[in-house]
Image (spheres, grey):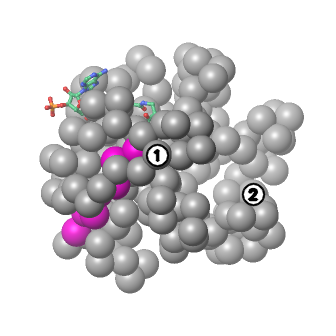
Amino acid sequence: MNPILVLPSEKYKESFLEALAEQDPGQMNPLEGESYKRFNGDFEAFLAYLSDEREGKNLLEGRVPQTVYWIIDGEKFIGRISIRHRLNEALMHIGGHVGYSIRPSERHKGYGSIALGLVLPKVHELGIEKALLTCLKTNEASRRIIEKNGGIFENEVTNDEGLVSLRFWVPTT
Ligand SMILES: CC(C)(COP(=O)(O)OP(=O)(O)OC[C@H]1O[C@@H](n2cnc3c(N)ncnc32)[C@H](O)[C@@H]1OP(=O)(O)O)[C@@H](O)C(=O)NCCC(=O)NCCS
């Protein structure tokens, strides 16, 4: 097992689409980061959108610049991990600086934990010394990933729908 982080690319299109097909349609924190559906299968336009988002261009209402990395092992798409370059009011409570998702068939193998470790230096490069990470209180796997990567618990918050999230700060060095 030797995952790496790469920028989204045409090279992994087939594997990415296979991963999407594995996913439960109601998945929270989906593999594509919530946007692919909007492109009706136009993969090129999807990549262009991600590139713009990385550069802070044409941002959708309420979004901050974000870099999406794909977690790749060999030639296989394993999942994605996204860095928000700054926090807005909403992300400060729930969402934080980093979000991730591992394809269902590759969960529970350690990829999520490794991916967060790999992304932290990239978060640091953006000038973020401590990254905010949040997870639902019920998401045991995500909580373990954050704690294993040095997350320091701050508090829990409840959203309008009554969902409880835990907030952690993770040093990026
Ligand atoms: C949460 C998620 C990213 C975990 O990824 P993963 O690659 O399976 O995680 P890992 O294999 O690195 O496991 C991390 C820890 O959680 C534990 N774990 C994994 N799946 C678990 C589960 N279903 N229930 C309880 N613990 C679990 C592992 O044993 C490991 O703990 P350990 O180090 O003490 O052994 C993945 O399940 C996922 O993509 N879920 C949907 C999207 C999501 O919830 N994203 C996070 C939003 S905050």
Question: In the rendered structure, which amino acid carries the disc numbered 2?
Answer: Tyr
How far is disc 2 from disc 1 in space, using C-alphas?
31 Å
Relative to residue 95, is residue 61 depicted above or below?
Answer: below
Query: Which residue is located at x 82 percent, y 41 percent?
Result: 38
Q: Position of residue 114 (x, y in %)?
A: 25, 45
* Left or right relative to 115: residue 151: left
Q: Is residue 74 visible?
A: no
Q: Mark 2 or mark 1, which is nearer to you?
A: 1
Which contiguous range is marked in magenta? 165-171
Q: Residue at x 81, y 50 (%)?
A: 45
Establish if 42 lies above or below 157: above
Number of numbered discs present? 2
Q: Quadrant of the N terminus?
A: top left
Residue at 29% from the left image edge and 72% from the top image edge: 130
- Which quadrant is home to the C terminus? bottom left
Q: Which mark is residue 49?
A: 2
Q: Position of residue 73 (x, y in %)?
A: 36, 36
- Residue linked to disc 1: 158
Q: Quadrant of ligand 1?
A: top left
Q: Earlier in the sequence, mark 2 or mark 1?
A: 2
Q: In which quarter of the view is residue 21 placed?
A: top right
- Which mark is drawn over residue 92? none
Would you say 50 lies left or right of 168 here?
right
Give the x, y percent position of residue 83: 48, 61
